[in-house]
Image (cartoon, rainbow, N blue to C red):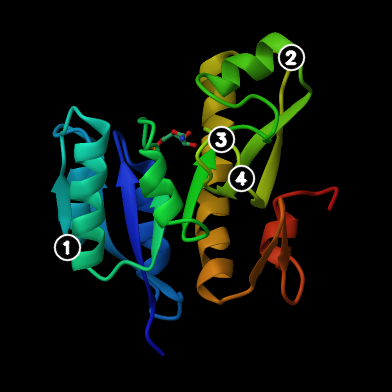
Amino acid sequence: MARLRVGVLISGRGSNLQALIDAAATPAYPAEIALVISNRLEAQGLQRAAQAGVPHEAIPARDRAAFAAAADAALRRHRIELIALAGFMRLLDTGFVEAWQDRMVNIHPSLLPAFPGLHPQRQALLAGARFSGCTVHFVRPEMDTGPIIAQAVVPVRDDDDEERLAARILAAEHQLYPLAVRLYAEGRLRIGGNRVTVAGGMTADIAALNPAA
Ligand code: GRF
């Protein structure tokens, strides 16, 4: 069966992109990374794409609408079916978000709706949260909102600083994102208002990321 064609939008390091590339290296994985777009020329993720033989483009447009037009054209040219934002640090044009409604997902390093926006790990520490984690969700025009597909919980330890907590959350992100994209690629996600249900139930591997589930 044809694999789902995923386009990944990045701005920097690209470790989540790498996790998706690594997952897709297994032929049985139902999605392939068919295009990587960066809004920054120097993004390390572009090198990861090159190394993996994935088509990649930098679109360093200053203007939001110009970026959206160029990105949209590239995504359509490469017949992309799902956009995965992975450390894409720029607000997207509303028309672009609407055009890709329910076909664009994002990963955020907190348990949304807690701690949206910048520095969510710092926010979790400042709030004294005992648990944080990461969220994969469908993208809506308002930043870090949208129906939640899957989450993974990590503990916040007494001696954590921002860096240690971020590293623990990032390790969970690298597991969660490929699993969530798999659910989408398998056609198992149903969106009803703000809620997503998973046909056949949440998978054991996602439940395993959340010991309380
Ligand atoms: C991740 O923590 C992601 O959740 C957030 O930005 C970071 C990107 O890291 N949106 P990387 O570029 O995937 O390494």
Residue 64 picture location, percent across and down: 27, 33
Where is residue 206 shown, x and y percent of the image? Answer: 68, 58
What is the CA distance from the residue labelled 1 to the residue labelled 2? Answer: 42 Å
Q: Secondary structure at mark 2?
A: loop
In front: mark 3 or mark 1? 3
Q: Nearer the viewer, residue 128 or 70?
A: 70
Q: Earlier in the sequence, mark 3 or mark 1?
A: 1
Q: Residues within 10 Å of mark 1 (few under 14, many from 20)?
A: few
Dot 1: element: loop
Q: Tell whether circle 1 marks a residue whose Cβ is less than 8 angstroms from ligand 1.
A: no
Q: Residue at coordinates 76% horizontally, 20% vertically from top-left?
A: 129
Percent position (x, y) of residue 209? 70, 51
The residue that mark 2 highlights is 158
Name the outermost residue toward the bottom.
1
Disc 4 vs disc 3: Cβ atoms closer than 8 Å? yes
Label 3 – label 1 distance at C-alpha = 30 Å
Q: Is residue 15 left or right of residue 55?
A: right
Q: Is residue 157 left or right of residue 109?
A: right
